[in-house]
Amino acid sequence: MTVRVLQFGVTGQLARELLAQAKDFDVEITALSRADADFANPQAVVQRVRDAKADLVVLAAAYTAVDLAETERDLAFKVNAETPAAVAAALGPDGPPLVQVSTDYVFDGAKGSPYVETDAPAPLNVYGASKLEGERAILAAHPRSLILRTSWVVSSHGKNFVKTMLRLAGESKPLKVVADQFGRPTSARDLARFILGQAERLAKAPAGDAAFGVHHFANAGEVSWKGFAEGIFDIALGAGAPVVGAAATADWPAPAQRPLRGTLDTGKLERTYGVTLRPWREALAEIVRELQSEQRSAA
Ligand SMILES: NC(=O)c1ccc[n+]([C@@H]2O[C@H](COP(=O)([O-])OP(=O)(O)OC[C@H]3O[C@@H](n4cnc5c(N)ncnc54)[C@H](OP(=O)(O)O)[C@@H]3O)[C@@H](O)[C@H]2O)c1
């Protein structure tokens, strides 16, 4: 069965990987950009959903500016909660399933061990609160919805930590990275391949199937941002890797507060779907190799 996927988002990390990886799966993706369907305008997006003939709808569009959300609360809630809820309602209980991507920032990070799906969320910032409201509204409106909470998403595209670190390493200035925030990095490609690989199962699954509901998705292994930076430099620069100093979250005040340990436990997803999520270092090596080969071809 060729699964017809209606994808919202074209330019983001996940959106680009969904489009790039589609060739390996039996899917046919129609992807709509912000110009086609602006999530600041729920009615416009709902119209697109009604017009489409899809077996699966994937939301890869989101308001992701964590610090800016503190001053753009209304827009963050519209894009991350109101419009996704309107899409879920438009699909209705009998419509095609919906995949929404959410975040570890729904948690406050104070648990002291990795979060499972049944742990009580308590977002520390507007972005996390907007994503949580989106999760709840979607699940209430559409029983065939899969919410994939993920964390520290990286890829060779867009703006992300890997690219920032490699740029900073090139500037040869002393480098300090936050050492007291822990989480699980996630390759946008791995997440995209998971979604595409499950498209047929999701399209066929009835309401109540274990495939739906909230599941956590992240590459294996917990690390601090400092440890992650060291991993990036080790893979990219080997013996030439710069020394990374430790910074504390408190030394770098930002508008949005972040969880100190929002680490996700992915056991439920691995059991339900029968998959094993590979170590973040392995996924990172793939991204670094890609960035280096892009650099070589640009030189
Ligand atoms: N990045 C992370 O570390 C992280 C961590 C946890 C969870 N997540 C979640 O993972 C998902 C994918 O994240 P990502 O890293 O791929 O995000 P991203 O690279 O920031 O991309 C966001 C996408 O959303 C689109 N978008 C933003 N505002 C829009 C609007 N008003 N209408 C329509 N489209 C709009 C952007 O389009 P434009 O190019 O037009 O702006 C872009 O295509 C999101 O749901 C995010 O909340 C991300």
Image (cartoon, rainbow, N blue to C red):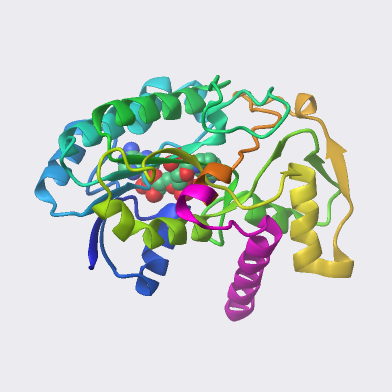
Residue 104: image quadrant is top right
Q: Identify the main secondary structure in magenta.
A: helix
What residue is at 81 percent from the left and 30 percent from the top? 248
Name the side, left or right, on which 65 lies relative to 96.
Answer: right
> Front-most of 207 and 108?
207
Measured from the top left, where is residue 160 in percent x and y? Answer: 59, 50
Q: Is residue 48 above or below residue 20?
A: above
Looking at the rendering, the stretch of residues picked out in magenta corresponds to: 271-299
Q: Which residue is drawn at 45% across and 58% down?
A: 194
| Residue 236 x %, y % | 75, 67
Q: Which residue is drawn at 52% across and 32% down?
A: 117
Image: 290 above or below 224? below
Q: In which quarter of the image is the C terminus?
A: bottom right
Horizontal and vertical percent for residue 205?
Answer: 28, 49
Query: Which residue is at 84% across, 68% downward?
Result: 238
Q: Is residue 146 visible?
A: yes
As drawn, 123 above or below 148:
above
Q: In this view, does 250 lie above or below 296?
A: above
Nearer to us in this view, 148 or 243: 148
Residue placed furthest toward the left: 51
Is 293 part of what is drawn in magenta?
A: yes
Residue 211 is left or right of residue 116, and the answer is left
Residue 40 in sight: no
Q: Nearer the viewer, residue 120 or 272?
A: 272
Q: Where does the N terminus fall, quadrant-wise?
A: bottom left
Ligand 1 position by quadrant: top left
